[in-house]
Amino acid sequence: MDPITLEKILSVVDAIEERREGNQLTSSAFSQIIAEQTRAKDLARRGQDILRILKAMGWIVPGGTGTLCLTQRYTDFISAWDEGDLLRINQGLANYPPYASFLVCLREEQAIRIPGRQDKEARQELGRRLKEEYDITFVAFDTFRTWALAVGQAYLSPFKETLYWGGNWDDQRPSLETFKDTCWKSYCEAKKTSGYANIGRLADVVCRRLNISFQAFEIKIITLVKTKPSLFVLAPATIRTPSRFFQAITIRPRSKVLKERLAARLLNQPEKPAKSQWLEHRYLEDGIRINGRLLKLIRWEESQ
Amino acid sequence: MTLTDDLRLLEVAIERPNPYERQSLVKNPFPGHGDARADACTNQQQIKQAFVDILRNFGPEAKRLRINGESGAGKTNILCYFERLTEEARLRGFIGAIYPIYVFAPGDSYFAIHEQIVEKLSALFLGDMAIALQTTPKLGDTLKTEVKQAAELLTALEPIVRPGMLFDPYEERRRDAFIQWLKGHKVPTREKKLLRDGLPDINSASLAIRFLDGLLQVLKRVELCDGIVLLFDEFEEIFEGLTRARQARYAQDLRHLFDTLQEMVFFVVATVPEPRDLGQYPAIVRRLGDPLRLQPIDSVDRAIDYVRDYLRVGREQYFKVQEKQPDQAILDTLEPLTQESIAQEYQALETEVRREGLDVLPGYFLPRMRQQMQNIVEGN
């Protein structure tokens, strides 16, 4: 079965939302969605593949003849996606056993070096090892790492070209104190100019130390700014061409996409291609947004 | 014979009467999607006041106004309106010789907007500048000494100012060559020969900006122009559509433009609220200053104000074309629309947009009024 990308799942689910009637979807509507959302040569087979995944996730169950039923799990996922609640979105995706296996694999491995596209040997070797130990193919690994990155369960270091387990976080974990101490320690070690370090570089060290994602880092540091505003100074900076190819990926709340879609329709403008709507890509060194300002530099003010 | 007399020669019996004439209109007064108007701009008092304050006190200090608005909020409309406002204010003597220049489609380098500025300035002033330099023989040499950044420019102008013959058969070609050169285009050798030998190619943004500054300084010295209002539309395209390398180059050039032309130019920049990569350039953000936000249509009363304004402008146009004295009652009426029909349209739109957390913007509302008007007038 061809792996299904996160963008594909989101496009199909978005189309289901447009066509559902209550918690029901007709099979013909589902077939139409597959025809519109995929470019597979064998639409029937592709439809079966995607339906199998949605059933395995517990999102769809068979209804009456020619009907599919959308479950509470599906509704929970939609609600999480509308709000952009990454942890709950991940819970929804983790209902899919192969993805759950991937998360187990990453948690146990803690760090997996990403072989370059041209390095066939390394890719084969990694694939062999993952298959042996976790029953995951390299193609599945390659697909699911984007899932995990986009929902804040993994961290991809552009400087180490390595995928790290990034799921050690929620509202309570790590505690603000632990987070602050790790930031301080990492700041002391970081390269600085006039006392300012690059936030992206700082995030890289903190995420690897605490096994949290870049999204978790952003959430925690914004909380820290609000609770201890005099702890450090954050500042913007002129662009510097990012030093690495890899970008931070985050799933965009569906509510935001719907807003843009409605605005485009009201202005009689063409809609953006679905693929470009669902995920946001950023360079780590570009910094983070706080209160609408893009901040790239950090300088610690209070000694620890 | 005047235009009015000549128009009468064209008058014929109209086989199909214009249905809008029954409503004292020339055409549907409401804009369609993407249509910007220069003659109507409802509300937005804070932005208008800020614009007028800077225009009225056009001094040598930095003059900048940043206007924020989502797509459909009316950015292009307010810039076109300010263009018209500046023109009218100058013609009526309310301000000095300040000219508006609207630029858009910023392209992938500074030269895309530089060309637009040079095109407009050349059309406005090249002829008069040449005459001013011709009629005061020593002026050119004086200006070359006193306005260093205009020295090469004035040298390039010499064959136009002093062609060396009573009738210059190459005058038009010389002007074209000069304009192409000033825009930074590669001028063919045979055209370049019509200008001075040894002219430097304008192949860098810093050189182009230097010469632009020189041109504006010369225009000021010969009392043709006290300054320009640069109305910059689609500013976000620079920060959302280009690669990082091109963005960085462009941002550097813009910073240089803002600083170099500070004395002579009032920059009015319209952009979406948070262009994706604009935050990467704090130097640009600082120079643009705190933005003023275009206000949405936030009530039925405001919606009626919009409709009233556009109908009024449409009817003023009708009376002008008909060469009749405007009838105040007709200017103020909402007919064939009613307050109820406008309110209904507004409230239906409001319900639709609020579901997704949007505001009612002129770009959503006015095309619907256009459709309503069309249904009433052309449907009957």
Image: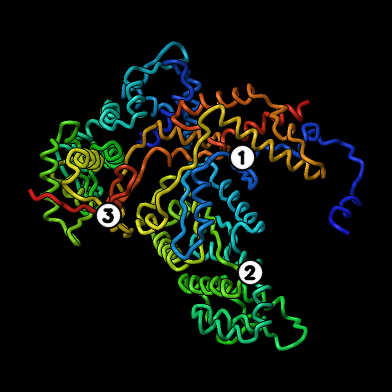
**Going 55% across and 59% down the picture, which residue do you hit?**
B229
- C-alpha separation, residue under disc 2 versus residue under disc 1: 32 Å
Q: Note whether B44 is above or below A194 in the view shown.
A: above
Task: From the image, tell me which residue sits under label 3.
Answer: A119
Quadrant location, the C terminus of chain B: top right
Q: Give how far across and how far down residue A136 sits, in percent.
A: 24, 36
Please identify the residue farthest to the top as the structure is shown: A64
| Residue A132 horizontal side relative to residue B119, left or right | left
Q: Label for residue B122? A: 2
- C-alpha separation, residue under disc 3 versus residue under disc 1: 51 Å
**Going 44% across and 65% down the picture, which residue do you hit?**
B253
Mark 1, other Cα within 10 Å: few <14 / some 14–19 / many ≥20: some
Task: From the image, tell me which residue sits under label 1.
Answer: B33
Mark 2, other Cα within 10 Å: few <14 / some 14–19 / many ≥20: some
Query: Which of the two residues, A167 or B349, is positioned nearer the viewer here?
Result: B349
Judging from the image, mark 3 belongs to the subunit labelled A
Tell me if I can see residue B192 in this picture: yes
Q: Give how far across and how far down residue B73 sits, in percent.
A: 52, 40
Amino acid tagged 2: Ser
| Residue B268 horizontal side relative to residue B83, left or right | left
Q: Secondary structure at mark 3?
A: loop
